Image (tube, grey):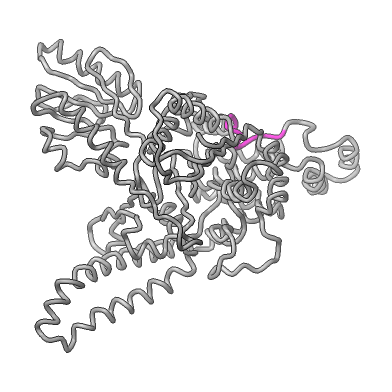
Amino acid sequence: MFISIYSPAPVVWHLQMAQTERRDAPGLPDFFQLKRLARDQLIFLLEELPGKKDLFIDADLMSPLDRIANVTILKQHEVDKLYKVELKPIVSGSDQLCFLIRPRIKTVKWISDLVNSDKTAGRFRRYKIIFTPQKFYAYVTTDEWNFYILPLDDDILSLELPEFFRDTFLEGDQRWMTTGGGALHLLQSVYGSFSKVYGIGRCAKMVYESWRELTEEGEQRTRQPEFAKVFLIDRDVDYVTPLCSQVVYEGLVDDIFRIKCGSVEFGPDVTSSDKSIKVMLTSQDQVFSEIRNEHFSNVFGFLSQKAKNLQTAYDKRRGMDIQQMKAFVADELKGLKQEHRLLSLHIGASESIMKKKTKQDFQELLKTEHSLLEGFETRESIAYIEEHINRQVSMIDSLRLLCLLSITENGLLSKDYRSLKAQYLQSYGMDHLLTFANLRQLGLLEEQQTGETLTVMESKVGKLVNDKTVGKLTDAFSSLAKKSNFRALSKRLALVPKYGEEYDLRVPRDMAYIFSGAYVPLSCKLIEQVLERDGWTGLEEVTRMLNGQEFAVTGL
């Protein structure tokens, strides 16, 4: 089994077990233990403020908390009312206030203003702040809830840290490194040591060092390990993958409806009613578990067959005697009704996706992405991006295409960068000047420096032809003069299947099926290569292009 850490915010850890290939492989660990540990510690911290109390919860902790300790459990431990932190005056009449929050300055400032307001009004209350996963120090009682990991499914763990990417890669704040180290230490404590640790990237190295220090300080336990290998991969090692449009069912659901904390809210257009329904997307949902990784072109055929099978199961009732009907109701009917409900929701979601994603715009978007990945028709791709921006199709998709263009071409030519930036600002507002500055700082959207693309001879050739021809020659020479790291990595690791080669999406032969056969995710390819080599040996050229910082450790 391996753990790979590669999502920006929240940080998600995906566990892949060997039992997909080996029947004798061990089963997945019981992650309910992690929920129980987190719940027990939270209850202990709440009970340290005895008596009835009102609990204020950060908005982005509401969903994770519901999966750890729901309202019923909180009520059992003297939580009277629950409020969402909204950074405005409160209406609570309780004499005891407890705050479950992230360590954010603006939230602590709000609590400070609240306490001072109570003092000015001559009102006495008791206050307690529970920070998670790290705490600030304040002049009221504070505690730290070590809520490091939330199991989202049988094989998915999440740190649920929405600020991780911005804080770490943009602001240079390293506070979450200790949180990552603490999470790995918790896994090691509960499930045994890891045999090997692989990593690449500056932050991955810091997380490993933090974890190693905790391991050396703590009590060593000897038990049969349930994990074998750990991979730590910095997000900036692989920016291309999250910039590409997924075409598997789960990816499209996230794109259209936004999956948050392992659940999604389907609106009236899906539920065929005037109400929205929140659905947990886990392997417990038998319909979702079978289509989550399927290419969308295969989904409707599966759902149609599932509906026929369900109808056949219902039809078994005909001709039953009383005893058989009683057994059917007791053993099967409830499960069939639940499956029918979920099937209806996923059919509705698929229809909604179909309406939004089978339009010409989406097909053109995919074509442009694939052209950028392959390095063909760059001028046509830029023309499409300009049209996309000027038509104001999607603010986020336009930025995504700009970033993908920049990374695959190792930055934009000055004339293209300035033109595209001006058009974007005209379409979506001058306040996005800061957006461009941030993307530039992250290395996601950059302008090529003068002299970076053309050699002296190429510049002389350019002067001999008219302006229109110069543009085409410039594009051709830029690809010859300086290949981007992505192009070199793509060639070295075979990330882009050969042009013109047919790809059967019904029988995928590699990880490229996620993107309709156009691209194999770099982070996944790295893991595959390291596993085959049992280390980074033979990948020196690849790690050099990824700015190094790779490491491999045995027996932590």
- Going by the image, does 208 lie left or right of 492? left
Percent across and percent down for residue 331 are 18, 71
Q: Residue 212 or 464: which is nearer the viewer?
A: 212
The residue at 66%/49% (across/down) is 382
Q: Residue 366 or 45: which is nearer the viewer?
A: 45
- Residue 114 occupies quadrant: top left
- Residue 486 occupies quadrant: top right
Percent across and percent down for residue 82 are 17, 35
In the rendered image, the residue lying farthest to the front is 222
- Going by the image, does 24 lie left or right of 204? left
Q: How many marks?
A: 0
Whether residue 13 is in magenta: the answer is: no
Residue 433 drawn above or below residue 484: above
Is residue 555 something one can see in this rendering? yes
Is residue 395 something one can see in this rendering? no
Q: Residue 298 or 395: which is nearer the viewer?
A: 298
Percent across and percent down for residue 494 are 68, 54
* Start-end of magenta stretch: 440-448
- Residue 93 occupies quadrant: top left
Q: Main secondary structure of the magenta part?
A: loop
The residue at 32%/61% (across/down) is 285
The residue at 26%/79% (across/down) is 313
In the rendered image, the residue lying farthest to the bottom is 319
